Image: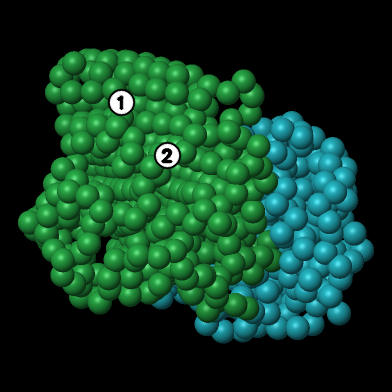
Chain colours: A green, B cyan
Amino acid sequence: MLPELDKFEVKNYWQRAHLDSFLELGWPSSKNEEWKFTSLDRLIKKPFEIALNPEGDIKYKLAPDIKDSYKLIFRNGIFDSHTSKNAAHNFTINNVLEDASAFTTINKSFLKNHPIFNLTLGAMRSAIVIDVDNASSDIPPIIELYFTGGLIEQSSHPFVMIRLGKNAKVNILETHCSVNSLSAPIVFVELSDGSVCDHVKCQVAELNSDQLGLTLISQGTGSDYRNFTLSSGGNISRSELHLNLNGEDASCHLSAIYLGNKDQHIDITTRLHHNVANCKSEQVIRGVLDDRARGIFQGKIRVAPEAQKTDGQQMTRALLLSRETEADTKPELEIFADDVICSHGATIGEIDEHQLFYLASRGIPEMEARSMLIEAFLIDTLSEIRVPEFEKQVEYYIQEWVSQSTNLSTLTV
Amino acid sequence: MSILDIKKLTASVDGKEILHGIDLKINPGEVHAIMGPNGSGKSTLSYVLSGRMGYEITGGDVLLNGESIMELEADERARSGLFLAFQYPVELPGVSGMSFLRASVNSRLRERGEEEVDQLSFVKIVRAESKKLGISDDMLKRAVNVGFSGGEKKRYEILQMALLKPSMAILDETDSGLDVDALKIVSEGVNLLRHPDRSMLVITHYQRLLSHIIPDKVHILSEGRIIKSGDKSLALEVEENGYAGINDAA
């Protein structure tokens, strides 16, 4: 429960207006079609208040550091300039609230009624905008957004906007491991014409934390955006991505892996808008669920009337390791143009007994065999990551998850 | 002591008894063949021996190197020295061939308390064995059995046998789906692995495999029972008279 938001002190009227919008609409109920599969009841009942200071630490192990990255650390959702590090790169960093152009972009957003959009814009204490220009270096620089620490019974609301200039290249890694009751970050990536961005998000927070993250993407002509999301942390988690293809010949590739066990609820929601002609989108989702976990994939592709020659593909597969898990898939195609190729597919299955026996007949113990088959199920999706450093990070968290999965560990020989 | 000693083995699948009391002893270094018509219980026998789930042993015993394996899981039997070459090798998309082979070999080494083999020396061993079987580097790089032709799959089974060095190998219809050339390569591979300490049980429908892999003994399986045993000439007899003739004689 967020107490007395109407009395929450904000720095400006703009934020106040967003909070008021949030208060007016309230938390979404499961009667809201967008939130049909994800109930926030457990979250709403928890007592917490909005975090005001960068504090709190985490105890568990994270993937090894990446060298030469530009690392921005958000503690409790608030930018921690003391621990952040700037490698050789020269980015320009500003405060969103002092950047007229960022302001305009946000105001133009179509998410005016989105609860997390309004809550985080209203409650944010740090709002950063980073500009990436067309650098001469062949190797795209790495920006790391590291959301860590925090206090339980507080909610964190970081906001980061990354703007790629014309033909600029950047690789972004987000790591979410904060322990807040609620972590509701917004990351906005704006790709100018011809720019290229590989973006990986690892949501590996502890199980007592709820994670409702928003990723907003807008793409200019000929831009190339590739997103990979790993979601294995949090109690209730929802990774929601809204992407707008606003310039012709732009392409995007979205892949995600969700891994759930115990009573986790993991939601991957994508909203893909083909607004102009000749764009391409591809989505590949894989999920593995154990114990009583529930996994959701909602993927909407909207093709505007003028978006002819659109190519939109979507495929989702879930692997259930226990009989008490549930996977829900809701693909939605809203096509208003007549010359398009769009497809979607979904499968849900279990570990194949024939494959397990084949491995057993070679002497491989059952636990190891299951791990091999789970990793094999995920490997295609993992290989969609083009940045080797990022692939290693994701691999690390997947292996951690597989080795800790309870159904596997109880089968120890 | 026999490598494999099957005593009065009865087994059922889905509550239906398929094997009605099999007795079979295989001594070290011997190659035995089991022949039989469709539905005689040949594949059931191979699955029962290797410990596949769903194949229930209702009576009798099976000793491997003098010890009962009936209480062991499939992977434990394999690590005790039993190997099954599959009639239909299973595709494992996403599982790299090299890591699969290494995991198999290391599981046996661990069992024996020996040091696991490192990646580099393992690649060398695999390459050497692959060469004998005409397995290309490209095939080794692919996922296990994925995109392999029928012949390639069978050669890959023999490669695994060569690497795992079992004391008892069961070859389940290894000849099925093979053309003459592939049959020759596979049989030569098997013959290279004949060893005084290793026994083999070759399960086949036809005599043609047994003209390449010459067995010490031939058994005819019919309706879940061994109805006749003899030397290699028994296989020729089947070839001439068919299984019906053997049944009549019994």
SS type, badge 1: strand
Q: Residue most toward the right?
A: B196
The answer to whether mark 2 and mark 1 are in CB contact below 8 A is: no
Residue B232 % position (x, y): 79, 54
Q: Quadrant of residue B202?
A: bottom right
Can you see residue A96? yes
Chain of the residue displaying label 2: A
Asked which quadrant contains residue B227, the reply is bottom right
Find residue A245 and name its label.
1
In percent of the image, x 34 and y 55: which residue is there? A125
Which amino acid type corresponds to the residue marked 1 in the rendered image?
Leu
Residue nearest the observer in this picture, B57 or A58 = A58
Chain of the residue where label 1 is placed in the rendered structure: A
- Badge 2 is on which residue? A94
Q: Position of residue B16 (x, y in %)?
A: 42, 73
Q: Percent from the top left, x then y, of residue A288?
A: 42, 58
- Quarter of the view holding residue A320: bottom left
Q: Is residue A156 left or right of residue B226?
A: left
